[in-house]
């Protein structure tokens, strides 16, 4: 088996050199260049096999395995992780998506904290009038603080924000508006959102269509944990 491998490798090597010379003289087409790459890979595999067999042969033992009546050399190679190069278009898209998520995720977190705060206050009121006053006051404060920043969000950022609100509060933006401002307001703003191609009832699927957003959010949370622990 060693003799066969030794005799085959020079043949492939000579053929590869021949193709390289021909490519310089005659500008081989893509199919011929592809065959060059294939021969190169085959040659590398044979050289690797020869190297492994030679190493075992020096120790006097070559592992063997019988397959369909033929005795063949058998080697166990270490696991190798192969990573392909990401297309530029995909890299640009992922970069833009991460930019959008990083911009709106803080708003989603603030929405979750504010929702919890309002719920705690509403749990202590004794009359519906007091509850409405709390909601009115909180709503005015939110509009004063976040109206301008949220108005500057792009369509894509607004869509992602609605998904992240669901992620952080376990409820849709539509449900929050209906709970605090009533069903009429909720359906009005839902109709406005639909006109602009958005949806206040948007959910969140971290293991499906929103998996890429979830991956970025987990990355952000991991970075925050590192900062809290002093960079350790």
Image (cartoon, rainbow, N blue to C red):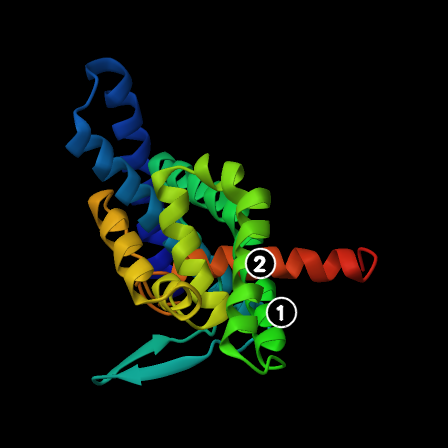
Residue 138's disc is 2
218 left or right of 16 in image: right
Q: Give the secondary structure at mark 2.
A: helix
- Circles 1 and 2, Cβ within 8 Å, touching? The answer is yes
Badge number at residue 186: none
Residue at horizontal 26 percent and vertical 47 percent from the top = 192
User: 99 left or right of 92?
Assistant: right
Name the one closer to the observer, 195 or 221. Answer: 195
Residue 79: give x, y in percent of width and height.
49, 68
Q: Is residue 113 left or right of residue 148?
A: right
Give the distance between the C-alpha atoms of the residues marked 1 and 2, in whole angstroms: 10 Å
Q: Relative to 137, say whether 38 is above or below.
A: above
Say which quarter of the image contains residue 31.
top left
Q: Number of numbered discs present?
A: 2
For label 1, the residue is 117
Q: Which residue occupies the foreground of this view, 2 or 210?
A: 210
| Crowd band around label 1 with a 10 angstrom C-alpha radius: few (<14), some (14–19), many (20+) | few
**Residue 158 in the image: x percent, y percent?**
39, 46
**Foreground residue among 226 and 108:** 108
Residue at the (55%, 64%) spot, across then down: 133
């Amino acid at each position: 088996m060693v003799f066969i491998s030794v005799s085959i490798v020079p043949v492939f090597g000579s053929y590869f050199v021949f193709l390289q010379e021909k490519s310089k003289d005659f500008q081989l087409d893509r199919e011929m260049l592809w065959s060059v790459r294939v021969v190169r890979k085959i040659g590398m595999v044979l050289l690797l096999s020869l190297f492994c067999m030679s190493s075992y042969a020096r120790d006097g033992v070559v592992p063997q395995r019988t397959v369909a009546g033929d005795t063949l050399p058998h080697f166990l190679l270490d696991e190798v992780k192969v990573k392909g190069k990401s297309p530029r278009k995909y890299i640009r898209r992922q970069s833009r998506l991460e930019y959008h998520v990083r911009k709106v995720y803080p708003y989603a977190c603030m929405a979750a904290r504010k929702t919890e705060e309002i719920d705690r206050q509403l749990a202590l009121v004794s009359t519906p009038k007091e509850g409405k006053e709390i909601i009115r006051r909180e709503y005015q404060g939110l509009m004063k603080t976040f109206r301008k920043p949220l108005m500057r969000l792009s369509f894509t950022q607004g869509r992602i924000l609605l998904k992240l609100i669901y992620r952080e509060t376990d409820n849709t933006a539509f449900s929050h508006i209906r709970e605090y401002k009533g069903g009429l307001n909720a359906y009005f703003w839902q109709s406005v959102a639909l006109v602009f191609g958005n949806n206040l009832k948007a959910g969140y699927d971290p293991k499906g269509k929103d998996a890429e957003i979830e991956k970025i959010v987990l990355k952000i949370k991991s970075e925050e944990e590192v900062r809290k622990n002093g960079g350790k």
